[in-house]
Amino acid sequence: MLTQVEVLAERDLWIGEMRQVVVGSRRVLVLRTERGVYACEDRCPHLGVPLSRGTLERDTLTCSAHHYAFDANTGEGKNPRHLHLETIGVECRAGKIFLGIDPGGNVGVDRCNGLEKAAEREQNRRVR
């Protein structure tokens, strides 16, 4: 069961901004686009470089190391398409931003993006 942990005030994260926060033992990138507030592990799946060192332009989050690009709203890869970010459940209420963590202090991976996408990614890995 996940517990909601407050990480930021909504007023402290404007559209087009991103911030690194530490939750439990993990670095998390919290960002805001025109569509809302999102969170993911603060590491590029390619080499583990912190995404907080990269850029956020509209809906595209780009890693500073090799310019890998991701959809900031979904975590899906844009370039290359086969990589994706581990997104984290976010809830905004009463002017505050909350992330889900489990009792062990680990950040809960967001399942809102659909188990179908995860299954599809796994199937694509097996085919290659």
Image (cartoon, grey):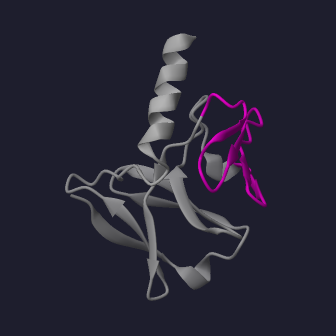
67 sits left or right of 128 in the view: right
Q: Quadrant of the C terminus?
A: top right
Write the start and end of the magenta stretch as one range.
54-83
107 falls in the magenta region = no
Q: Please determine whether, in this image, residue 127 is positioned above or below residue 85.
A: above
Q: Position of residue 65 (x, y in %)?
A: 73, 35
Q: Please determine whether, in this image, residue 94 is positioned above or below residue 61.
A: below
Pick the residue in front: 124 or 90. 124
Pick the residue in front: 61 or 42. 61
**Furthest residue toward top:** 128
Q: Position of residue 111 (x, y in %)?
A: 41, 50
Is the stretch drawn in magenta largely helix, strand or loop?
Answer: loop
**Furthest residue toward front:** 116
**Residue at 49%, 50% in the rendered image:** 113
Q: Quadrant of the N terminus?
A: bottom left
Q: Please determine whether, in this image, residue 36 is positioned above or below residue 77.
A: below
59 falls in the magenta region = yes
Residue 89 in sight in this render: yes
Q: Quadrant of residue 82?
A: top right
Residue 29 in sight in this render: no
Q: Position of residue 11 (x, y in %)?
A: 59, 84
101 sits left or right of 41 in the view: left
**Residue at 59%, 47% in the rendered image:** 75
**Residue at 49%, 14% in the rendered image:** 126
How many discs appear? 0
Q: Position of residue 2 (x, y in %)?
A: 26, 60
